[in-house]
């Protein structure tokens, strides 16, 4: 894919949030998007038509992250009120609130089967919740981090967390083993490549680092953007050919995965880009910002 085929043309602006939008996420097939933010709401959109479908309200403080199940029937959310919410998409009802974090919750992810949700918190822990059980207690707590856990990704057998303590820690759930890769800089965001071989870590020294998922070897670094004090997302395109990062000055960067050259950068927002989400199949991207908007980009 050449730089001209990257989604850098604005297709829609999704307006409705009051205040900063903290996350924008495509659903599993890329037909819908969920966004959340400072206004304590979660919003469901058809991003390809620029239409707001539904607004979800129950959080008492800002909402920092959201993730939808593979069958699009449920989603989870988290934020400043220390709880993980488990929602029914169609009714808008909160099915369960998982309580247990001793601080604000930064990130949430379902596993493949959507039976479990894992949350990352200010209390230096990852917590695992069983969506099928009626218990609101975590089924597992991972608390080996030395500082705030900012981000979490899941594979079929592993939970991977990124922390302000400078580590990316991988927990193999089958054998109960932990591996820790120390990057020496606060980790803001982690993302996994589509082939599952690499972990991309966004760090607060304005650098993205690509790690081999099995060995922890540092494969490449990506620079040019600004990431020093805000949570800004990073991810890979659906072909794994390019790395994407949001910047605190409102720009979005695309780097070539292999040689780390900046192949495209453009102004997506006026203020900090908080989130980037790439469509699972098409060359289409969502960005969100402190400026209160979500933008849909196509090639």
Image (tube, helix red, strand yellow):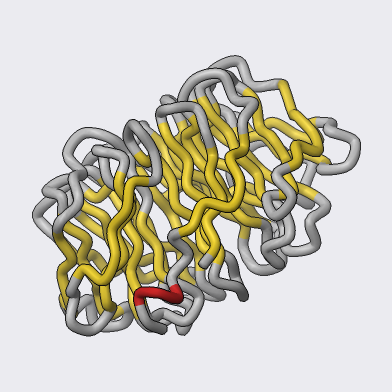
Please determine whether, in this image, residue 52 is positioned above or below residue 238.
Answer: above
Question: Quadrant of the rendered structure where residue 90 is?
Answer: top right
- What x and y, as percent, mark residue 127? 50, 45
- The correct choice, above or below, for 223 with respect to 249 in the image is below
x%, y% of residue 209?
20, 66
Near-viewer residue (258 or 61): 258
Determine which quarter of the picture holds residue 165.
top left
Q: Is 88 in front, or is 272?
A: 272
Q: Nearer the viewer, residue 158 or 278?
A: 278
In the image, taking residue 244 as reference, residue 35 lies left or right, namely: right
Q: Position of residue 215 (x, y in %)?
A: 24, 82
Task: Identify the residue at the far right of this view.
Answer: 91
Q: Quadrant of residue 53?
A: top right
Residue 156 in view, yes or no: yes
Q: Which residue is drawn at the image coordinates 83% and 52% (left, top)?
A: 73
Asked whether, in this view, residue 77 is left or right of residue 182, the answer is right
Residue positioned 40% across, 63% down in the render: 235
Query: What residue sits 62% from the left and 63% below the top?
Result: 111
The quadrant of the rendering that contains the N terminus is bottom left
Up the image or down, 83 lies above or below 112; here it is above
In the rendered view, tell whether residue 59 sits above or below residue 108: above
């Amino acid at each position: 894919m050449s730089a001209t085929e990257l989604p850098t043309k604005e297709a829609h602006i999704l307006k409705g949030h009051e205040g900063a939008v903290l996350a924008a996420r495509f659903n599993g097939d890329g037909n819908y998007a969920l966004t959340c933010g400072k206004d304590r709401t979660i919003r469901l959109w058809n991003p390809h038509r620029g239409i707001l479908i539904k607004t979800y309200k129950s959080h008492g403080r800002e909402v920092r992250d959201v993730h939808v199940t593979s069958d699009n029937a449920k989603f989870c959310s988290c934020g400043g009120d220390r709880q993980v919410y488990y929602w029914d998409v169609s009714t808008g009802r909160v099915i369960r609130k998982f309580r247990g974090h001793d601080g604000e919750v930064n990130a949430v992810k379902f596993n493949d089967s959507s039976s479990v949700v894992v949350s990352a918190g200010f209390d230096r822990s990852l917590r695992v919740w069983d969506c099928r059980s009626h218990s609101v207690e975590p089924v597992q707590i991972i608390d080996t981090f030395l500082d705030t856990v900012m981000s979490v990704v899941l594979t079929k057998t592993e939970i991977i967390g990124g922390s302000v303590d400078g580590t990316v820690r991988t927990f193999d759930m089958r054998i109960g083993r932990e591996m820790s890769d120390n990057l020496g800089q606060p980790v803001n965001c982690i993302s996994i490549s589509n082939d599952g071989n690499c972990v991309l870590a966004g760090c607060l020294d304005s650098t993205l680092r690509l790690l081999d998922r099995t060995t922890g070897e540092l494969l490449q670094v990506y620079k040019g953007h600004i990431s020093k004090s805000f949570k800004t997302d990073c991810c890979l395109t659906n072909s794994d050919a390019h790395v994407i990062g949001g910047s605190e000055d409102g720009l979005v960067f695309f780097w070539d995965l292999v040689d780390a050259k900046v192949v495209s950068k453009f102004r997506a927002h006026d203020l900090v880009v908080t989130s980037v989400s790439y469509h699972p199949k098409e060359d289409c991207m969502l960005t969100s910002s402190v400026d209160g908007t979500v933008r849909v980009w196509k090639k």
